[in-house]
Amino acid sequence: MYTNIKEKLQAFYFSRPAPWGQDPHNPMLDTITDAAEKTNETSAYKLKAIQYKTIAEIFQPKIFACVPFYYELATKNSYGDGSPFQPGKHAGGWLTYRNYHLFRDENPEVFDQFKQQQSKHFHFTCGPYVDLVHYCFSYTNVVKNGLKGIWEQAVSQLPNCKTQKEKEFIECGIEGLLAVKRIAERFAEEAKNQLQSIPNLTQDERDNLEWISRTATRVPWEAPQTFHEVLNCLAFFREVAGSIDGIGQNAFGRPDVLLKPFYDTDLKDGILTKEKAKDLICKFLLLWDCHHDRTSIFSIRQPHEFENSLNIGGCDENGNEIFNEITEMFLDAHYELNCIFPKIMCRYSAKSSKNYLQLINRALLAGKSNITLSNDDSIIPALVKSGKTVQDARNYLTSGCWDITIEGCEKKPCAEYFNLMRPLEAAIHRDCLPENRIPPKSITVSHIETAQNFEELYNMILKDIYAILEYKRNAIYIGYRIWSDICPNPFYSICMKECLENRKDVTAGGAKYNPNTVYFAGFANLVNSLLAWKEVCFDKKQFTLQETIEAMRKDWDGYGDIRQAMMSTPYFGDNTKKSKELSAKLHNDLCNFVNSMKSYYGDTFNAGYLNYVEFKTWGHTLRATPDGRKLGDAISHGIGPTRFRYIESPSTVINSMTALDFTKCPSGSILNMVLPANISSAQLEAVERTMAKAGVQSIHLNCIDKNLLLEAQKHPEEHADLIVRVCGFSAQFVSLEPSWQEEFINRNFYKL
């Protein structure tokens, strides 16, 4: 039914990828530079205003006559969500490219050490010190007020400005609002031009162009008035915010909450039918699913990541369940179109409607793992405990890959991964690490071989972890201190209620909430390592601590007896008293330390258990560890157990999770599980409800048979529709490069 639309969208987007590692020159950057040099301005805000105005005049609107939406500025490559660090420099990143060196110039020694720590896999940040990738636009505010309403509020704030920086922020934000008004007007002009210049338009194409030519002159400057106009705003601001501010804009908010009142009104007024609404939703989804060629082979250098997430379900501000016609239409459309993108993030709870879970599980049971489940019962209490109001917490989003944030009032750095196993590796292998694995001078590790008892060993390991966390915190303070003088985001910020009222950019702490984050990677490996040492070296005294260290330095070669002893101890996920007690202690110690730190703006640090492809890439270089790992073995993913200890039943893992207090994890935690392909809908629903009651925060479920995967390796042409959840993204299994296919096949396949 949508073949023509798919062909037109794919013809455009598939021709626009910029391969990682390449950086083709973009002449739009030269034009902005020329405009800036004529003014001799040095203020980041005034330079950003020049960037806004220039982009608004020189971009070339791309309108697809076959779709009833205007949104594509065509200034970024097809992977681009606006992040300045994605392949192919784009106009929105001009100010960041121009000023990036200032992050290093502020303190070259600390900056270089920080980058060395990252390159040696101690931690990861999506930017210099600050996250420039994960942003969530304030859709609710702009839909309610229109840009004109925000502009009026901004103008009224000018007399209240107390500093030059406040004045420059408001003035630049106003320029951004006016630039976006001009961008929309140019879409209207282009639609009128196509109506006059393109021969043989179909009636649908003519209707679409006429709608765009009428609507873009008014929306989003004026608040949208119809279901169609609001849906267009979701597409428009997703592209515009990234394209002019140079930030990774990767969430669509909560469309079943935002669209429902307009849907009801349009039905009542007779200007919309349920069938027409479903058709618009289908076409909206295709805009994003057709950005990326899913048949291309995934590798680290050629990712299958197009960060856009769309949240449905959950509850409203009063705690009432959200499950309406819009929720159903998005799930139906996503399933029927066989979409991978946008990422569907389904909020749920132990009390979610049966019909809702059945709609979600339809895709999972069909071998299409393209949905994330986020548990309101666990996430909302964690957010409230971290300082959010109950109303804000109930309006949370799962954005990007799996990050928990609040739309319209929070700027939270995401993908702040911390490798728990790297300090341990450095302490174990300190005398025999290759040059590229030796810790930088900014990191020292304890002489763990001197520990006389388990408590001393445990404290040494945590001391090393805490020291690196403190160094990371102090380093990023430098970045936050100068962020607003380097690459502020006034258009994005002024659309946030608190930023406008505070007269501060998000980069200056203007949002209502300004936390920092730490996402721990390798938690299960660390638990298992500690359990192994405790039992083998201190409780049973089978081998000395030094003997186990020597065995690991030889990658266990010739030390099979020691490795076997270390792998015969309790382990995370086995639901035994010993593993649950130690995992709870480690969890509490790590989270309490993180939560005790303060962000640069005085907010909290938030803990969580998430990691992207690093579970494989970090593991590839990580040397042998006490849990029985060998050099190159993957580390555990999220809050899940390792794959080196076979666990047959998912209930064993779920019951183990009850030992952990997830209210200490407001940043969220992910559990990735592979369940049997023949699981029934009722069984899958029971697993999900059990996870919700156990406090598991977010889950990725694959319902698939290992033999089918092996068959797909042999006959990929017969299994193109097999979609697996790799980590923060889903992909066709046959499109994964062989090493990633093997990684998935070697996961723990649970039985019921």
Image: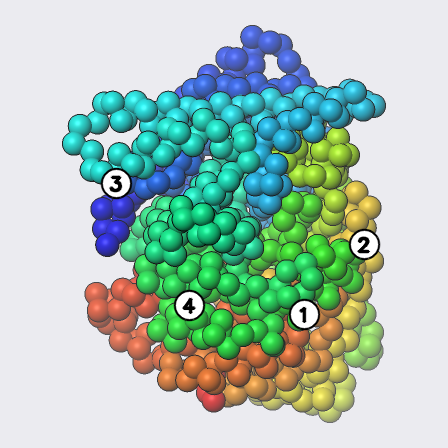
Q: Which residue is mark 4?
A: 369
Of badges 4 and 3, the one in the foreground is 3
Type of amino acid at the residue the image marks with label 2: Met
Q: Which residue is mark 3?
A: 204
* Mark 4 surroundings: few (<14), some (14-19) or many (≥20) residues within 10 A: many
Q: Which residue is mark 2?
A: 597
Position of residue 369 measured from the top left corner of the image (x, y, whole percent): 42, 68
Q: Can residue 83 be seen here?
A: no
State the residue at coordinates (53%, 81%): 687
Type of amino acid at the residue the image marks with label 1: Ser
Residue 681 figure quarter? bottom left
Q: Quadrant of the N terminus?
A: bottom left
* Alpha carbon separation for disc pair 4 and 3: 34 Å
Q: Residue furthest front?
A: 269
Q: Which residue is mark 1?
A: 378
State the residue at coordinates (38%, 39%): 69
Residue 7 falls left or right of residue 444? left
Q: Considering the numbered disc 4 on the image, is that residue within a helix, a strand or a loop?
A: loop
* Alpha carbon separation for disc pair 4 and 2: 36 Å
